[in-house]
Image: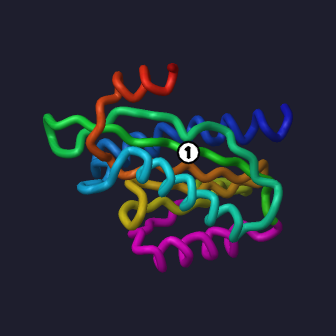
Amino acid sequence: MNGRRRAGLIAGSLGAVLLTATVLTGCGSGIGTTADEAKDSVVAFVDSSTTALGDGWEVDSGPGLGKCDRVPGLGGISYVYIKYGPAGQDPVADVDTVEQLWKRQGVTTERYESGGSDPVRGVRGTGGPVGSVDFLASSEGYSIEGDSRCVAGDFDEITRDSQE
């Protein structure tokens, strides 16, 4: 299995965790933020996170448009942006680097780690300039998935406009 496919699988399984966190916490209040600003913000945030970890990162997906609830019963849109990169030499230090960067930007973070002899480490967060974000550090590769704040917008209309 090549590195891109492995990172895609890692990001895919991570997506379920991130989706659960987004559903439980909402995707952040983007009141006063336009759809373009939300998209630009999540791209800049993920890009700055990957830059802090070095070269070799590639876009896996996005920024992709999605639906979200700004408050229960009031829909909106958000953007998901995923990048993957090579595994670093020191995943523990890399998780710390990402967590400190995010905290300086107002993101509330939580670390996690799987069991086993080769644990997957990571940190997820909410708030600041994004709705939610997750960094996964595996010996097979790294990934960062960011979800923008949920902002006012009509998913169907934006989808139609982007196809014209």
Q: Please give the name of the residue rendered at 44% of the width and 62% of the height, measured from the top-left corner.
A: 125
Q: Magenta stretch? A: 89-113
Does the magenta segment cover residue 100?
A: yes
The residue at 62%/41% (across/down) is: 11
Up-down relation of residue 39 to residue 163 (above or below): below
Q: Who's the residue at 50% across and 42% down the image?
A: 80
Q: Is residue 77 left or right of residue 75?
A: right
The residue under label 1 is which amino acid type? Tyr
Of 5 and 83, nearer the camera is: 83
- Residue 88 x %, y %: 79, 63
Q: Position of residue 53 (x, y in %)?
A: 73, 67
Residues 120 and 108: in front is 108
Judge whether residue 27 can be spotted in this image: yes
Horizontal side of residue 9 vs 164, given as left or right: right
Q: Nearer the viewer, residue 128 or 138?
A: 128
Q: Nearer the viewer, residue 23 or 91?
A: 23
Residue at x 51% of width, y 39% of height = 15
Query: What secondary structure is found at the residue carrying circle 1?
Result: strand
Residue 46: which quarter of the image?
bottom right
Magenta-drawn stretch contains 114 = no
Quarter of image, res 51: bottom right
Residue designated by label 1: 81
